[in-house]
Image (cartoon, helix red, strand yellow):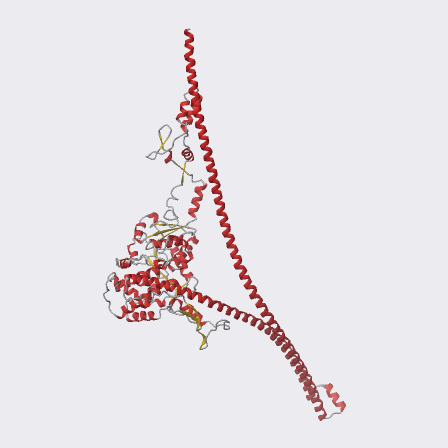
Amino acid sequence: MNISNLLGSFKGEQSVSQSVSSNSNSNSNSNVFLFPLQYTIYQKKLIDILVTLHKKHLIFSLNTHDEPAEDGKMSDSSMYEAFVYNIKQITNHPTLLVDHYIPKDLLLLNPKENVINLSQKYYCVNEIIDRLVSQKKKKTIILSVSNSKEMDIIESILIGKSGIEYYRFSGASLYYDDHGSFNFHGKSEAPNVKSESSSKTRGRRPGPGRGRGRGRRGGRGSSTVSFTRGSRRSVDIDDSPNSDGSVTGSNGNKLLHEDYTVKISKNNPEYQSKIKDDKSKPIKVYLILPNQLKYLTQFKELRSDLIISLCSNYTELETINVVGDVPILKPLVVNSLEYFEWKIRESFNGDIEEEEINKKISLLAISKLADIEIFTPNMPNWYSTENITLRLDFALSELMQWINNGEKSSEYPFKKYFDTVSKLTVTEEVTNLVKSYLETQSSQCLKPAVAEFERYKYFELPPKESVSKHNGKENTTLKQEGSDEITHGGNHIDKRPKKNPYFNLENLPTYPTYREYQSFLTCYIDESQRALKHWIDDTSELLKSIHLSETKRQAAIDSGNVEIGELFKKDRDLDVLIEARKKIRDRMSTEYDKTYNSLTKGDNETLNDIVSESNFGVQDRYEILEKIEDIAIDKFAADVENDIAELSKSILSINDEISKQSEINENVRQEYQKMSTNAAELSAYLKQLTDQSLELEKKSKNNFVELQVCSIKEKTEWTEDQTRILEKENSFLEGFLNLLEGERNRMQKEVGSAHPSRGRR
């Protein structure tokens, strides 16, 4: 879609002022329950773009007093009005701003996942409906939106969902001939069908010679023939409609069989299947505008169990007179512009002007933009502050439990997220926060991704590009918006596409004309989209090198784990061997002590007898003892040295085996990478062939249907030709019979006139 049409339908300041309601009713609706949300990355990026576009005006407005607008230029109040209007559109759904007045065909082609994931409001609504369908409970949900464009987006989400039926009360459906898939009369009465006999009668028209022509032949003498042909006259009817819509028979009388319909019995399988289909759709969804909602709730048949308001304006809910205290669920992004407008209008009781409200909520929302986290469907923590952390699944489960139990039977679980509200006045602290955000606002939504790149450490330097290290850390930087190139690790990688030479934010005046504002917003979104796409391409290249680095790191870890396992086994075997040697040493030490004690104390009678018999003196005994000790010590030392030598040899052989296994593991890893690459290529090729086969199969089915249609058309034409030929022959034969009848009557008259003349003679 051409981005220049983005704001083409946004006609001047008058259109902007329509976004803010003039009604300032102060009574808060006790049936309204706020549900906390966050921004998606698409919404945060568009809001950053809009804040950057208003940066010069915001700084000027904070530092100086309001100045009167020049002729043809936007005033201070209109700038804030435009800012508020666009922020509300983005907060509701980014498509409302970027694809403004998108054609229906393009909306039909937009994937449902994209429509849902662009805005968390619509993501949560989709989750609520899916969970209600899975519970298979009869529920009626009313979705209130601001305009038909938002209704089209909601309808694109609802289409194709099993277990629901919906009806839109404003505008025609994009997908159905009526206003939706819901039939109000489907359950109150049995479906009607036309009479089979009447349809057959309507299909016959009297040909030439039928009807009254056959009636004339019925005047002959045979009563039987007259009865048969008379009954035929009563069946052959001319059902050509008159001007009043009635049907005229052959006798000129009006027939009323066109208005007669036959009701199908409730025991009919067709009716039973319809009832079964109706019971399989427990969820009814009504799409309606807020100004129509107060009339809808007055009908008992259309009362709902829950109203979900997706409107951006606070005052739209004030006009709803809900019968039966139906709860109204209002999803809000905490600390957003819509959130602050809700709180301010609740607090000031309508005693504040619209211009002051727009300026106040704009500054308060900008001061809190840095604190709002970006939502993604797969993130673990959905909503978090300093003291509160909320998970998305848990929040939706709590909400569904509250919906099923009813408003009065259980307390609403999300009040605490809206009880702690910051001050609703623009203080000096708020002004400083706004200025600080405007100074450091560039690429806010991409900072988490850039921080992840900066913290990453390569396993080894990439072969084609080096990562420069500064203070021992990799330096990976994202080029800010407005420059010409992106660098990773300080090295030049690529240049961005050339920008629009007529686009430069510095040329935007503080108070532009509306045409300038419109043009600059269009160009800035276009340039930001191209810059973001270029950054994504460069980041994907960087991720490839990171994935390769992670693969190498994992391979090194795996090989190290194998080596550690082998060494652990060897160390365990050595520990077992050492323990065995220690036991041998202890046993030998014990035996040595016994021998030594027996020699020194004379406890051993055998040794004493040997010494006494040999007549050895004391000195000789000491010499014998020393020799025994030396022999025992030498033998033990020799055994230990032999064991150590054997262990050293086994360690050397084990090291050789480890080196061989490392080489084998490296070869196996390389072979695995080759096989993995080939498998990926074959998988891509298989997918391509599968897509081609499916496409050919679809084409063949379409061609077969066309052949069948052509064959049926040819048979129909042949049948019509044969019918026309037979009608012509029938007309000819009837005319011929009439001639023969006339000739016979003439001859009978001649014969009758001839007989009296003979009598006279």
Residue found at the very far front of the displayed protein: 501
Q: In the depicted view, which residue is nearer to us: 715 or 671?
A: 715
Q: In the rendered view of the protein, which quadrant contains the N terminus?
A: bottom left
Nearest to the observer: residue 16 or residue 406: 16
Horizontal side of residue 587 vs 432, given as left or right = right
Considering only vertical position in the picture, is 597 above or below 268?
below
In depth, the one of 258 and 464 nearer the eye is: 464
Q: Name which quarter of the figure residue 669 lies in.
A: bottom right
Residue 416 seen in the figure = no
From this viewpoint, is residue 685 visible? Answer: yes
* Residue 236 place in picture, x, y as percent: 41, 29
- Quarter containing the C terminus: top left
- Please say if 727 is above or below 168: above
Q: Position of residue 226 (x, y in %)?
A: 42, 22
Residue at 71 percent across and 91 percent down: it is: 623
> Residue 671: where, in percent of width, then height?
58, 66
Question: Can you give x and y, in whole percent of width and height, for residue 431 in the image?
Answer: 29, 70
State the residue in front, 194 or 304: 194
Compared with residue 307, is residue 751 higher up or lower down, i.e. above or below?
above
Rendering quarter of residue 74: bottom left
